[in-house]
Image (cartoon, grey):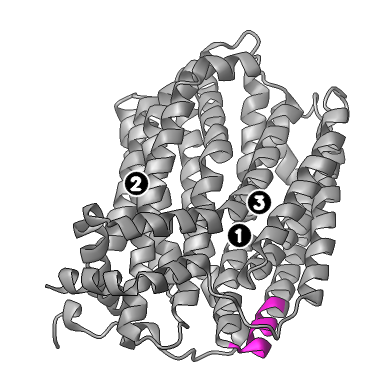
Amino acid sequence: MSRPNQMDVSIVIELPLEYPDYMNLLGMTIQTTIGYICLDLQTFITLYFISQIDQGLLQMAGIGIANSLILIFLIPIGFAFNQSLNLQTSQTRVIRGSNESSKVRLSKRILVIEIYLLWIILTILGVILYFSKTLIQEIFDFDENSKVIDHAWDYLIFLLPSKIIALTFDSLKNYLMAYNITYPFIIIHSIVTMIYVGLSYFFIIQLKMGLEGAGISILLSELLNLLGIIGNFEFIQVLVFIMAGLNQTVFSQIKQLTRNDWNLAKQFIKISLPIIVHLFSYYSVFALLIMLSFGLSVKHINLSYLILSSALLILEFPKSLSLTSITLVGYEKSKGQLSRAQSYVVTSTVIYFIYSCFLYLIFSTFKDNIIDYLYEENKDQIDFNGMFNWFLISIVISDGLQGTLSGSLKGIKKVKIVSYCTFLAYYIICLPIALYHIKDENDCGKWILISFVIGNSILCILFIIFLYTSDWTSRYSQLPILQELDKNKKQIQVDIELEES
């Protein structure tokens, strides 16, 4: 067999789909979900080991604050850039008049630009966030527990670079998903999660390093994830072929960005802005309201972060389903395969409906056991029985459904509609309702969840209307970044020839 870097990459990316639509959609979603769940499990592993040491509750609260701030300020931009990369890579696969080798080079050029932008922007935002400690402390009055913010900032030293590395890994994941490749992530995340257990035990318990040990563990695990996806896994042949090209383009040639690349970067940001608005509207309201709903004492910070982490764990499946919908719906629509694109929309909605019904049944059946196990110490202060049903309706049903539908809309290039609707539902409707009841000590949490149900229900209705009324027969207009590529085709060909030489 010839060496991987001598293989024709078109052999890899044009493999026919061997399964019916629903099996392909479900398979990609499950494989992506398992990878994300492994990352969430690392959060619970950290909290478990931290709880075993002195001042564990204070340090857990610091971890909760640090992760919530990252969720609000960095994650929306990172996820938005990565979804935009997936969207644009999918369209490069169906450019007419180009051979497969040129299409792959174009998509890799977009990948290089996206990673470069990701590192620059997230580094700037991370530095700003780190030096905003005093401002954050003034905005959130942490009553008598001033050490919480100190612990949060101690953890941020490690968490900021860890999340930048994690989002870089997610960039490569979104790129590969655009070519219908998802199964390597299960292997990588599963192995790293098992290693993470050992790292956390060693640094947190054995060396008694506390937050610093947790930070070192998460940083090392993210580095292992990244090394896993860029390494040469001989038993994953498809990954080897593609990564043989990626290693050269991304890491060897990344400093050779040309003037034309910066023009492409501007177009990339322009395309990504509506997705940033959508995800920032979602994550900022979601994280802030859950934190504020229980108060900012140490006990309540830990409780709210536990609920937030549980909600994010539940939402990993619809998040993966949404990302898969972006990939498959967008690709089939770009090819003009309208019936297949529409079948993916219907199938993804049906799959999530079955998933939500299953979860609702499980949680409803074991509701009392879950409340007793997780929130026993707070049962005398908060009416969990009253909140639990609203939690299920808000998170399990309405939130996941709107996320799934939003992926289908993004796939057919209705990104601006998604961002406008999300801003309307969360900032104009959901947030005012929640803030009106924020001082109601008895029913604050319940009303915040009710506000989410109202906002998400409105989004579901709007998304269904736009999906139903969209003109599916119209052809896509070429994305601005690809128009820019066409304008600079001669210069790009020169760049490609230099790379090959």
- Left or right: residue 212 versus residue 145 is left
Amino acid at pointer 2: Ser
Q: Nearer the viewer, mark 1 or mark 2?
A: 1
Mark 1–mark 2 Cα distance, whole angstroms, equals 22 Å
Residue at 88 percent across and 24 percent down: it is 440
The disc at residue 34 is none
Taking the view exactly as shown, the residue that stands out farthest to the top is 144
> Which residues are drawn in magenta?
336-345
C-beta proximity under 8 Å, tags 1 and 2: no
Which residue position holds label 1? 319
Q: What amino acid is at disc 3?
A: His
Which quadrant: the N terminus? bottom left
- Reply yes or no: does residue 131 show up in magenta: no
**Residue furthest out toward the left:** 501
| Viewer-closest of 240 and 121 | 121
Residue 236 lies left or right of residue 68; in this view the side is left
The secondary element bearing badge 1 is classed as helix
Question: Which of pointers 2 and 3 lies earlier in the amino acid sequence?
Answer: 2
Residue 278 - label: 3
Q: Is residue 79 above or below residue 407?
A: above
Q: Which is more foreground, mark 1 or mark 3? A: 3
Q: Relative to 448, is 249 on the left or the right?
A: left
Q: Quadrant of residue 451?
A: top right
Query: Can residue 339 be spotted in the picture?
Result: yes
Residue 320 coordinates in the image, percent (x, y): 57, 63
The reply, left or right, for residue 296 in relation to residue 478 is: right
Between residue 460 and residue 48, name the one nearer to us: 460
Among the two numbered marks 1 and 3 on one chain, the one whose residue lies closer to the N terminus: 3
Quadrant where the C terminus sits is bottom left
Relative to 210, residue 488 above or below: below
Mark 2 lies on residue: 221
What secondary structure is marked by label 3? helix
